[in-house]
Amino acid sequence: MLPYLFAISLILLAVALAGIISDRHFVVLMLAVELILISSSIMLISFFSYTQAPDPSAVPMLISIWSVAAVEIMALVTFYIYMKSKGYDFDVTKLSKLKW
Amino acid sequence: MALPVLLILLAVFTIAASMLVFLRNKLLHAVIFLATCSLGSALIFLYLGQVLVALLQLLVFVGGLATYLIVAVAAEEKKLIKLASKVRFVFAAIVIALVLLIFLPLPPNPQNAGNDFSAVAEAGFSSYYIILFAAVLLLFAVGIGSVLIIKKSSKLVV
């Protein structure tokens, strides 16, 4: 079963990386990062479930994944509303306008 | 080895939802498909016997983050920026998946050890609950602070 789970998380990672390469929308790129976090949590829990000597360090690692996901969404929403109020475009190819 | 049909169905569900995040026509649909993908991952955790992790995954990703995103971002978005090329995305996804699957060695196939995540967490981290609660409170304060800053600096109604 573990090879299947490993393959699932790798395919999810591949989809997210392909999305980062192909898409230009700022918010969708951040959603791709969320997808990478979901993929990493699947891999972490899979290895945790199948190992003979479970390592307690998996617990803070999973909490860290959830925290990073939450903070990323908060930063995304803050940045999104800021950009919207300033009238910036969400096309990442035009983000150079944000330079100082 | 018998094929784990249920796991394969869950995998197809999750991967299809993840691909639809990028093949969507509206941003709102992308967020809904991300929530669906999170639901798929929670079902995979349930399949592995990690009930608490599945529940928390649902709470954090579907209940919290997806709702926050839908309310704050996706419902506001009117302008659509389409994918440069859907064919290029699918091609890139297939190529990257093949490269990862070929060059990363697959792990061996052990039996499920039946490790309970909640029991390990309880045994190892019960003395750190106060620190964890403090971290959660800080995160909550950051969220509230970001909303207040946005409200102060923008004319949009939050």
Image (tube, rainbow, N blue to C red):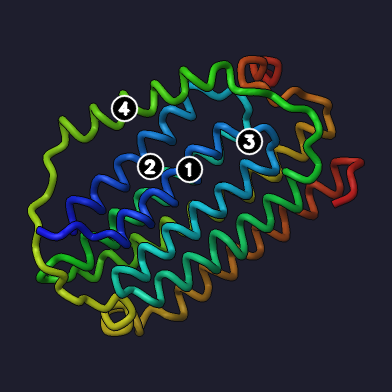
The residue tagged 2 is A12
Amino acid carrying label 4: it is Ile
Quick one: label 3, few (<14), some, or many (20+) residues within 10 Å?
Answer: many
Compared to residue A85, the image places residue B132 above or below, namely below
Spatial separation of the CA atoms under disc 3 and disc 2: 18 Å
Task: List the residue tagged with mark 3.
Answer: A27
Q: Residue at x 69, y 45 (%)?
A: A77
Work out whether disc 1 and disc 4 sit on a shared chain: yes
Residue bearing the label numbered 1:
B18
| Residue located beneath label 4 in the image | B96
Q: Are marks 2 and 1 in contact (CB under 8 Å)?
A: yes
Say what amino acid the circle numbered 3 marks: Val
Q: Spatial distance from mark 2 to mark 1, Cα to Cα? A: 7 Å
Asked if residue B120 lies left or right of residue A75, the reply is left
- x and y percentages locating residue B120 in the rendered image: 26, 78
In x, y percent, where is residue B141? Answer: 66, 63
Q: Is B42 drawn above or below residue B18 in the view shown?
A: below
In three-dimensional space, the C-alpha distance between marks 1 and 4, rounded to whole angstroms, equals 15 Å
Subunit under mark 2: A
Q: Which class describes the residues within 10 Å of circle 4: few (<14), some (14-19), or many (20+)?
A: many
* Tag 2 and tag 4, C-beta contact below 8 Å: no
Task: Please state which amino acid type lies under the numbered disc 2.
Answer: Leu
Residue B10, relative to residue B125: is it above or below? Answer: above
Check disc 2 and report its element: helix, strand or loop: helix
**Residue at the spot 41% in from the left edge and 77% down from the top edge:** B52
Q: Name the residue: 64% across, 50% down.
A: A74
* Circle 1: residue type: Ser
Mark-to-mark CA distance, 1 and 3: 15 Å
Tag 4 secondary structure:
helix
